[in-house]
Amino acid sequence: MKAEIISIGTEILLGEIVDTNASYLAGQLPLLGIELERVTQIGDNKNKLVEILKHTWERSDIIITTGGLGPTEDDVTRDAIATFLNEEMKVDVTLLEELRAFFKRYGILMPESNIKQAMLIPSACSLPNPQGTCTRMAYREGR
């Protein structure tokens, strides 16, 4: 199995933060028998990310994206994946309730902008995130 990691975030490209996610993942993949072939860093640009996804899809068995899943306007990962796969995102009611519960535990009313984090494409499933509000998603071809 060949894999590629796409790290998303202008702050990574500008050197404002270190890409610790890609570093961690790169160390874990060989332990699973997966050969990492490339790590790509890209800014918060939906159209460019869609293009990178197209090229990566053609040459890799596994694509791992990291970053760009927050509630702000510059978080474009889920939108780019939906565009690339030609699927429409919809609010997942279960995810939305989990997000609201997360904020409630801290006595905070969930900002409306966080509803974006409860959106999924039909072919994806969410993966639990006990550490925060960013929804982790998995897509499997032919699902």
Image: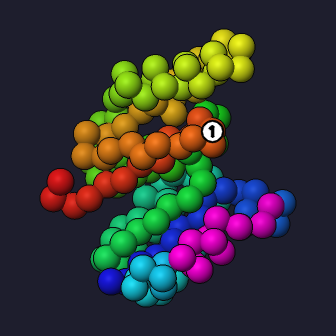
Question: In which image quadrant can residue 72 be found?
Answer: top right
Residue 14 or 95: which is nearer the viewer? 95
Tell me the SS state at disc 1.
Answer: loop
Residue 136 or 6: which is nearer the viewer? 136
Q: Position of residue 4 (x, y in %)?
A: 46, 76
Please state if 133 lies on the left or on the right of 55 as rendered: right
Q: Residue at x 48, y 47 (%)?
A: 136
From what the image shows, is residue 101 above or below residue 62?
A: above
Residue furthest toward the left?
Answer: 142
Residue furthest toward the right?
Answer: 16
Neighbour class for label 1 at 10 Å: few (<14), some, many (≥20)? few
From what the image shows, is residue 4 above or below residue 125?
A: below
Question: In which image quadrant can residue 132 be found?
Answer: top right
From what the image shows, is residue 24 above or below residue 66?
A: below
Q: Position of residue 97 (x, y in %)?
A: 46, 20
Residue assigned mark 1 = 132
Q: Position of residue 46 (x, y in %)?
A: 51, 51
Q: Residue at x 60, y 54 (%)?
A: 67
Decide if residue 62 is in sight here: yes
Q: Please identify the quadrant where the N terminus is shown.
A: bottom left
Please state if 105 lies on the left or on the right of 136 as rendered: right
Q: Please identify the quadrant where the C terminus is shown.
A: bottom left
Decide if residue 41 is in sight here: no
Please state if 58 lies on the left or on the right of 36 as rendered: left
Q: Residue at x 66, y 56 (%)?
A: 9
Q: Which residues are magenta?
A: 17-28
Which amino acid does the dot numbered 1 rest on?
Gly
Residue 18 in the magenta stretch? The answer is yes
